[in-house]
Amino acid sequence: MTTTETPTDRPSRERRPRISLFCFRAVAVVIALFAIGQPIFIGSYFSGTFGALGLHAAGAAALQAFGLLVPIAAVAVVAMGGRWWFLVWSVTLFLLIHVQAVLGYVRALELHVPIGVLTVGVAVGLAIASLRRGAGRPRETRR
């Protein structure tokens, strides 16, 4: 005796951001690590290690490159039913990184330093939020 399974008998699979969330997490963690490295590099420069300024500039370039990827990864997470605020904070981080870099290159340190602190905080906060268990839960649908 064989039984046939109808489409209504199968449990419904909810859409969850798995691969997209993994990619978002990877980019967010890399950005957080580079952001944490920036004050370390510039502190080394101020302590007399003059080669650290080159590391600070290279870190800024890497942050700008990865800053382009984080909103793209966040769009994929949201498209798969993930948390919408990942996109909001990713775009915020993208803008902070680029404003921060421009202010650094024009030597506007009175703005570069506080915005840098904010950038590190947002980057670390976004990475931690993406690694939490609830980050993979699909967003609730309104009825």
Image (spheres, grey):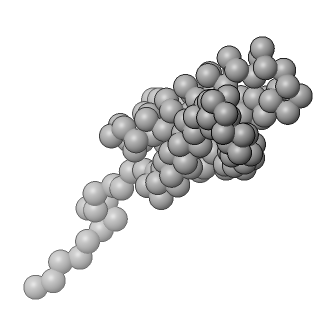
> Measuring 62% from the left and 35% from the top, which residue is drawn there?
44
Q: Which quarter of the image is occupied by the N terminus?
A: bottom left
Instruction: Give the camera-side residue of 118 and 60.
Output: 60
In the rendering, at what x and y percent does residue 86 appear?
55, 35
Is 102 positioned to the left or the right of 21 in the image? right
In the rendering, at what x and y percent does residue 82 appear?
49, 42
Q: Which quarter of the image is occupied by the C terminus?
A: top left
Residue farthest to the bottom, as pictured: 1
Is 94 positioned to the left or the right of 13 in the image? right
Residue farthest to the left, as pictured: 1
Q: Can you say whether 85 is above or below 135 in the image?
A: above
Residue farthest to the right, as pictured: 106
Task: Please identify the quarter of the rendering in which residue 10 is found.
Answer: bottom left
> Measuring 66% from the left and 39% from the top, which residue is drawn there?
49
Is 105 positioned to the left or the right of 1 in the image? right
Instruction: Give the camera-side residue of 117 and 25.
Output: 117
> Measuring 34% from the left and 65% from the top, which residue is drawn there?
7
In the rendering, at what x and y percent does residue 24 appear?
53, 49
Is 103 positioned to the left or the right of 64 in the image? right
Disc tally is 0
Task: Please identify the quarter of the rendering in which residue 122 is found.
Answer: top right
> Measuring 68% from the left and 17% from the top, which residue is drawn there?
114
Instruction: Give the camera-side residue of 141 and 24.
Output: 24
Q: Is residue 79 visible?
A: no
Q: Can you say whether 18 is above or below 56 in the image?
A: below
Q: Is residue 23 visible?
A: yes
In the rendering, at what x and y percent does residue 34 appear?
59, 43
Q: Can you say whether 54 is above or below 38 in the image?
A: below
